[in-house]
Image (tube, rainbow, N blue to C red):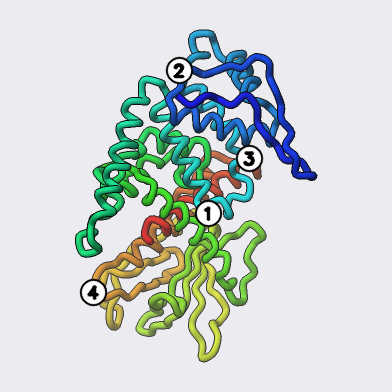
Amino acid sequence: MQPILSHICRYLFNGEPWIIKKKKKKKMKHLSSIANEVVLRCSQYIFLLLWSTIDEIVEEFECQWKPAEATDSRKFVEFCDSKAMSRVCQNIPERIKDGSFTRLTLDMMLAWQQPDVNDNESHLEAVGKESEDNRIQATLSPEQDDISLFYSYIMPLYVGEDAFVYLASLIPLPADIINGRYTFETLTAPTGHQLHFPAYDMFVKEIHKCMKYLQKQTKTRGVDLADDEIILHVEGTMASQRVVRHIKETSWPGRLTLTNYGLYFEAAGIINYEDALKIDLTKDGASYVKPNSTGPWGAPLFDKAIVYYEEGIVLEFPEMTSSTRRDHSLAGAQEIKLLMHQFLKKYNVESPLQAWEVHSRTILGIIRLHAARE
């Protein structure tokens, strides 16, 4: 077991370390090696945030919990993770880009999964197996190296479902605690329900990439978006296949934009798009969005469209084989209308802070769907 350091260095403006010394040093002897490592790293973040040393963190934990629970390794790991998370999330785009965020949060999940000193044997066995497999893999020729890194016999250090949901309770970026188990099932379907670092790192980076992509999208023409209105999905641009609006026997190609308040269809003009037609997803009443079939002269031949029933707006997503594009856009629209705005009205959520929390969770859920598709 790695010893917990008795001092933490903080560099001041002159570059000299400030060393805090403690006469008496507490050791969490019941922690596993991975848990000790995570606690040490968390203590560094906590010191930068609250100027609390590792001994003071242990004392605070023991004061807050009952004596029987004060030696609970998992509770102590959770305590350190929660106190360090606000510091970890600072400058998060850069941390995601260089991989430090995913490495730390994966270690947090592993520490939560194997918190006790009794778990050291299984952890060291997994590390040794991983090192041995890496040496074997290095001797293979490029022609033989056709085995994916995601499989468990290549990377034995994996995170289970409960640990992944635990991380979702700390930070709702990779998953939400409400639907975290479904996210885990999606990510681990090819790997036997075992989450390894490459898949997790790729997923989080894809979330960040989707956010940057949506921020670069041009705003709808002729309609001013609200200050808290965020673009969540765009179909029919030059980079994607077209979207077609059907009006009786005529068809108009264009661009469709989904936000957290509505759908905007912009018919394609000769040079630019025309002014957007807004489909308000916040309305009450009989308005709803459902799948629909379209075809030549209005014949219901192809199940690749959606219809907004109150205004009779039919939008088709032409595709050669499946109806994936339609299903993706329909899921986003129903998530906004049925699961967000109707939820806010049903429970009469009046607090702006609580309402924006619901918006944020929905927005992140749609972005995770984008990332999972990629």
Cα–Cα gap, marks 3 and 4: 55 Å
Name the residue at the top extreme.
67
Cα–Cα gap, marks 1 and 2: 32 Å
Name the residue at the right extreme.
14
The disc labelled 3 sits on which kind of residue? Arg
Q: Is residue 47 above or below residue 102?
A: above
Q: Earlier in the sequence, mark 1 or mark 4?
A: 1
Of tags 1 and 4, the one toward the viewer is: 1
Cα–Cα gap, marks 2 and 3: 26 Å
Residue 364: x and y in percent read 50, 51
Side (left or right) of 6 relative to 331: right
Residue 128: x and y in percent read 31, 36
Callouts 2 and 3 close, C-beta under 8 Å: no
Q: Earlier in the sequence, mark 2 or mark 4?
A: 2
Of tags 3 and 4, the one toward the viewer is: 3
Q: Earlier in the sequence, mark 1 or mark 2?
A: 2
Of tags 1 and 3, the one toward the viewer is: 1
Q: Residue at x 71, y 30 (%)?
A: 19
Q: Is residue 337 visible?
A: no
Q: Residue at x 48, y 54 (%)?
A: 336
Q: Which residue is mark 3?
A: 87
Q: Earlier in the sequence, mark 1 or mark 3?
A: 3
Q: Which residue is mark 4?
A: 301
Label at residue 133 = none
Cα–Cα gap, marks 1 and 4: 49 Å
Q: Which residue is mark 2?
A: 30
Q: Nearer the viewer, residue 89 or 272?
A: 89
Of tags 2 and 4, the one toward the viewer is: 2
Q: Nearer the viewer, residue 184 or 35?
A: 35
Q: Earlier in the sequence, mark 2 or mark 3?
A: 2
